[in-house]
């Protein structure tokens, strides 16, 4: 069984905004959204990153 790394990528600017996690390939993406990363996002309306899990 192989593992897949998932990383939190901001929907607005596309930057990685936090630590990734590894899960088995059959498990798929985590069910919950990643925690909001620190720092400012220049593309987001409220200035905060809006991460989602993407396969690394």
Image (cartoon, rainbow, N blue to C red):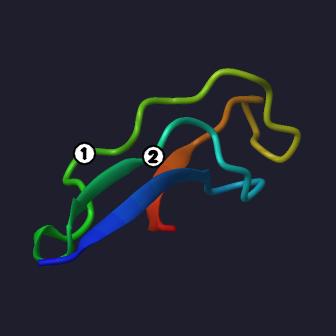
| Quadrant in which the N terminus is drawn | bottom left
| Image: 14 above or below 17 | below
Q: Is residue 11 left or right of residue 40?
A: left
Say which residue appears at 77% left-offset and 29% top-offset: 47
Instruction: Please give the name of the residue rendered at 45% of the width and 46% of the height, measured from the top-left corner.
Output: 20
Where residue 50 sits, quadrant-wise, is top right
Q: Residue 8 location in percent, x, y?
A: 51, 49
Q: Is residue 22 left or right of residue 31?
A: right
The residue carrying pointer 2 sits among few (fewer than 14), some (14 to 19) or many (20 or more) residues within 10 Å by Cα, namely some
Q: Secondary structure at mark 1?
A: loop
Q: Secondary structure at mark 2?
A: loop
What residue is shown with label 1? 32
Mark 1, other Cα within 10 Å: few <14 / some 14–19 / many ≥20: few
Q: Position of residue 26 (x, y in %)?
A: 11, 77
Compared to residue 29, the image places residue 47 above or below, namely: above
Q: Residue at x 83, y 47 (%)?
A: 43
Q: Nearest to the eye among marks 1 and 2: give it.
A: 2
What numbered label is drawn on residue 12?
none
- Who is closer to the viewer here, 36 or 20? 20
Left or right: 49 as drawn, with respect to 32: right
> How many tags in the picture?
2
Q: In this orientation, which residue lies closer to the viewer: 22 or 47?
A: 22
* Direction front: furthest residue: 1
Looking at the image, the residue that sits furthest to the right is: 42
How far apart in space, not on screen, are marks 1 and 2 (Cα)?
13 Å
Is 1 rendered above or below residue 21?
below
> What residue is pinned by disc 2?
20
Residue at (88, 39) in percent of width and height: 42
Q: Position of residue 55 (x, y in %)?
A: 45, 70
Q: Position of residue 22 (x, y in %)?
A: 31, 54
- Of the two numbered discs 1 and 2 on the same chain, state the one appearing first in sequence: 2
Q: Are marks 1 and 2 in contact (CB under 8 Å)?
A: no
């Amino acid at each position: 069984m192989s593992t897949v790394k998932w990383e939190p990528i901001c929907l607005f600017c596309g930057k990685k905004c936090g630590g990734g996690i590894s899960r088995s390939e059959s498990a798929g993406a985590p069910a919950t959204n990643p925690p909001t990363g620190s720092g400012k996002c220049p593309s987001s309306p409220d200035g905060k990153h809006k991460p989602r899990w993407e396969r690394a």
